[in-house]
C-alpha cells in the first residue's frame, strides 16, 4: 500500500493558524505513507497537476488531502483521482480549515494538534478504503416547480422555453405572489403589474407548462429522475373556460369577508377574483366563507351566472405525476408586527405595515380609497429584522429601499406631506439604490437615525406620538404623526415548512432553506435534483429573485440534459449472515429505502434500495446485530478512526 498525503495552506486560511510543517512531519511518521507534500492552493490547476503527476510517479494507490471541507472541494480531488486512474473512493479528506483554523483561530497550538489528529484519522481510514462503483441511472426532462411568485414563474418560463415539461403548483387561486400586490418597484418606480402581468400571461400560454393553482403538494417520494408527486387540487367551483369574469355573481352574494389581496383593508365576497391581473382570470368560490354547498344553502351566484360556469358538484382531486427534478420557490411571509407590541400594530388604527401601505397607495392610484393617510407620516425600519429579542438577527435587505419608495410615492402624490424615516442603518447596496436614496433626501424625505422606543395614541385626535433618540445629533425626539408605517422584514413562507418536511431539506439559522454551499452552489440543496429559487433561500429583492430563479432552472437543465447520472455509491448494505430480520432498520430509515422481505425458508431479511438510500447511517446505528453496515464507513473503518483519535 502506498499512501500520499497532501496538506493545503488554503491561501493562508489554514496556514495562518495551523503550523503546516508540524502536520507534514507528523504525517511522515505514519505507516504506509510514502509521500507527504504541502501546497499553497492544492485545488488550483497547479495543485491538481502536482497530485496527478505524483500519483503516477510514486505509484500511489491511496491519497489523503488535509485541506477544506469535502463538501467544498471533494469533487475536485475525486476528479483528479479518476484522471490518474484511481477509484475516487480511495481518497480521504481531513477538514483542517473549518474544523481547525477557522474554529480555533485564537488557539494556534490547539488548532495544529487537532489538524495532526484529523490527518492521522484520515490516514487510518484510507488504509481500509475499498473502491466503490457508481450506478448510472436515467433522467428525463420533467420538473416540479413549487410556488408561482415571480421566482417560480421565471424558473417555469425558462424551463418551458427550453422544451422541458413543467408542473407549476401554486396554493393560491392566482399566480404572481406578493409582487402582484406591489404598486411600483424600486429604484426605477416601474409599475409592478406592468412587469409581472405579461409574465403571468405567458405561463398558461406556454404549452410545456401545466399550471395547477389552488393546489398544494401533499407528498413527494422517490429520488432524482423518479420523484413521484401527489398534489391536492382544491375545487374553485367555477369553470375557468366558461367563466367570462363578468362579475354578475358578485353583487348577489350576501357574504362579505376581508380581502387578502388588499391585506384586509377592504372587503370581498365569498365568490371573488383575486385581482385585476389574476391568472387564471376566473372567479373562485371560497367555501370557508360561503353559506354552504353541502347541503346547498344559497345558490344566488349560480342563478346569476349566464355562462353557467358555476358547478357546486366538485370535490378535491388528487393529481399524481412523476418528475425528474424539483425547484422550490415558495417565497416569503411578512413579519407579524403584533410580535412587537410597542409599535401598536393591530391596536392603533393608524399604524400600518408596509404591505398594507403598498395597497393603500396602489388603490389610491386607481381611484379607490382604502384609508386616510394624513399629512405627517413616519416610517419605522427594522421591524422584525436585525432584532435579537425575537430571533430575527438577519437583515431583510429590501426594507430600506421599499420604505424610500413608499416615501417617494407619497411625496409625489402630495409634496406637502411631511415624511420621516427612522432607521438603524441605511443599506443601499444595489444598482441605482444609493442614487434613489439621495433623490428621496432631496425631495424632502427626512432620514433620522434612531430606533423608536414606543408609540402612544392620543385617544381624542388619534394622533400617534413617537419617542426616539436621534443617535446622530444626540437629541431626543418626541413628535406626533398622523400615520405610522412599519417596515416589516421577510420571513419564510409558512408553506415552506411543509415542503421542507416532505423533502427533508435543511434550513439555516434564520429559518430559510439551506443551500448546498453559499458561494459555489447557492441554488442547489444537499438533496440531489432539488433546487432553490427566490426568497425561499433568504431575503432578496425582485432582480435577485429572478436571477436566482433562472440559475435554478439552468442547474436543473444542466442535470437533465445529461440523460443519465451517477448514483452515489455510499449506501447501506446488509450482512445477510447475521441479519435477524427484526425490522428496526425499516422503521428508522428516513428515506424509506429499506424493506423487510420474506425468504424462501420463512425468515425475513432487510433489503436496501441503493437508489433511495442516502447513506445517512441511521440503520447502522440502530441495528442490534451489526448486520446493517455503510459502504465507505463500515465498522472496521470506524474503529480504526477511533483508535487513531484516541
Image: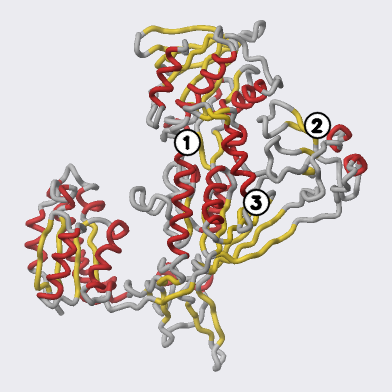
**Residue 646 visible here:** no
Q: Name the residue under label 3.
A: 205
Name which quarter of the figure residue 449 lies in.
Answer: top left
The image shows residue 504 at horizontal and vertical percentages of 50, 58
Farthest-out residue, right: 303
Residue 311, placed above or below residue 493: below
Query: Mark 3 or 2 closer to N-term?
Result: 3
Inter-mark Cα distance, 1 to 3: 27 Å
Q: Name the residue under label 2.
A: 256
Label 2 crowd bin: few (<14), some (14–19), many (20+), radius 10 Å: some
Tag nearer the camera, 1 or 2: 1
Label 3 crowd bin: few (<14), some (14–19), many (20+), radius 10 Å: few
Q: Identify the residue shown where x is 64% and y is 45%.
A: 201
Q: Of residues 192 and 641, which is closer to you in this image?
A: 192
Number of marks in the rendered image: 3
Q: Identify the residue shown where x is 42% and y is 30%.
A: 386
Inter-mark Cα distance, 1 to 2: 34 Å
Q: Name the residue under label 1.
A: 541
Amino acid at each position: 500500500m502506498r499512501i500520499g498525503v497532501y496538506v493545503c495552506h488554503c491561501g493562508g486560511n489554514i496556514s495562518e493558524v495551523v503550523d503546516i510543517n508540524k502536520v507534514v512531519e507528523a504525517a511522515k511518521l505514519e505507516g504506509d505513507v510514502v509521500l507527504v507534500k504541502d501546497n499553497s492552493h492544492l485545488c488550483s490547476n497547479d495543485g491538481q497537476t502536482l497530485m496527478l503527476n505524483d500519483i503516477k510517479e510514486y505509484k500511489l494507490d491511496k491519497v489523503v488531502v488535509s485541506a477544506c471541507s469535502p463538501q467544498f472541494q471533494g469533487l475536485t480531488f475525486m476528479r483528479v483521482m479518476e484522471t490518474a486512474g484511481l477509484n475516487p473512493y480511495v481518497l480521504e479528506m481531513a477538514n483542517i480549515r473549518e474544523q481547525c483554523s477557522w474554529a480555533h483561530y485564537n488557539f494556534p497550538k490547539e488548532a495544529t494538534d487537532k489538524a495532526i489528529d484529523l490527518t492521522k484519522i484520515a490516514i487510518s481510514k484510507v488504509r481500509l478504503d475499498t473502491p466503490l462503483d457508481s450506478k448510472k441511472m436515467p433522467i428525463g426532462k420533467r420538473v416540479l416547480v413549487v410556488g408561482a411568485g415571480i421566482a417560480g414563474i421565471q424558473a417555469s418560463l425558462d424551463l418551458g422555453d427550453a422544451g422541458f415539461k413543467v408542473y407549476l403548483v401554486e396554493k393560491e387561486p392566482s399566480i404572481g405572489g406578493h409582487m402582484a400586490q406591489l404598486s411600483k418597484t424600486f429604484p426605477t418606480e416601474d409599475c409592478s403589474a406592468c412587469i409581472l402581468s405579461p409574465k403571468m400571461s405567458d405561463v398558461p400560454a406556454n404549452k410545456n407548462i401545466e399550471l395547477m393553482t389552488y393546489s398544494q403538494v401533499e407528498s413527494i417520494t422517490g429520488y432524482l429522475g423518479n420523484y413521484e408527486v401527489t398534489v391536492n387540487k382544491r375545487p374553485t367551483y367555477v369553470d375557468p373556460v366558461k367563466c367570462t369574469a363578468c362579475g354578475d355573481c358578485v353583487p348577489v352574494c350576501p357574504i362579505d369577508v376581508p380581502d387578502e389581496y388588499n391585506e384586509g383593508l377592504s372587503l370581498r365576497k365569498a365568490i371573488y377574483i383575486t385581482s385585476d391581473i389574476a391568472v387564471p382570470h376566473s372567479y373562485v368560490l371560497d367555501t370557508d366563507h360561503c353559506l354552504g354547498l353541502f347541503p346547498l344553502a344559497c345558490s344566488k351566484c349560480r342563478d346569476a351566472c349566464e355562462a353557467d360556469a358555476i358547478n357546486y358538484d366538485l370535490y378535491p382531486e388528487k393529481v399524481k405525476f412523476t418528475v425528474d427534478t424539483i425547484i422550490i420557490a415558495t417565497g416569503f411571509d411578512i413579519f407579524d408586527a403584533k410580535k412587537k407590541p410597542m409599535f401598536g400594530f393591530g391596536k392603533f388604527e393608524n399604524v400600518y405595515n408596509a404591505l398594507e401601505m403598498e395597497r393603500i397607495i396602489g388603490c389610491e392610484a386607481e381611484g379607490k380609497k382604502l384609508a386616510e393617510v394624513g399629512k405627517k407620516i413616519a416610517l419605522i425600519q427594522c421591524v422584525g429584522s436585525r432584532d435579537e429579542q425575537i430571533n430575527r438577527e438577519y437583515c431583510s435587505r429590501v426594507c430600506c429601499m421599499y420604505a424610500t419608495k413608499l416615501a417617494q410615492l407619497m411625496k409625489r402624490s402630495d409634496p406637502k406631506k411631511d415624511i420621516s424615516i427612522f432607521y438603524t442603518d441605511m443599506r443601499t447596496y444595489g444598482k441605482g439604490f444609493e442614487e434613489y436614496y439621495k433623490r428621496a433626501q432631496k425631495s424632502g424625505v427626512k432620514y433620522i437615525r434612531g430606533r423608536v422606543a414606543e408609540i402612544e395614541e392620543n385617544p381624542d385626535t388619534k394622533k400617534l406620538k413617537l419617542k426616539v433618540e436621534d443617535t446622530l445629533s444626540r437629541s431626543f425626539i418626541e413628535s406626533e404623526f398622523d400615520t405610522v408605517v412599519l417596515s416589516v422584514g421577510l420571513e419564510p413562507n409558512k408553506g415552506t415548512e411543509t415542503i421542507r418536511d416532505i423533502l427533508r431539506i435543511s434550513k439555516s439559522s434564520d429559518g430559510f432553506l439551506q443551500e448546498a454551499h453559499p458561494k459555489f452552489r447557492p441554488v442547489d440543496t444537499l438533496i440531489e435534483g432539488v433546487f432553490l429559487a427566490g426568497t425561499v433561500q433568504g431575503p432578496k429583492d425582485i432582480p435577485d429573485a429572478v436571477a436566482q430563479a433562472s440559475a435554478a432552472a439552468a442547474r436543473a437543465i444542466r442535470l437533465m440534459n445529461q440523460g443519465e447520472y451517477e448514483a452515489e455509491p455510499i449506501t447501506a448494505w446488509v450482512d445477510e449472515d447475521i441479519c435477524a430480520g427484526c425490522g428496526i432498520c425499516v422503521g428508522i430509515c428516513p428515506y424509506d429505502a429499506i424493506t423487510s422481505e420474506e425468504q424462501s425458508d420463512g425468515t425475513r431479511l432487510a433489503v436496501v434500495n441503493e437508489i433511495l438510500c442516502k447513506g445517512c447511517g441511521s440503520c447502522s446505528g440502530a441495528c442490534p446485530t451489526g448486520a446493517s453496515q455503510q459502504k465507505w464507513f463500515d465498522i472496521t473503518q470506524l474503529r480504526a478512526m477511533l483508535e487513531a483519535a484516541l
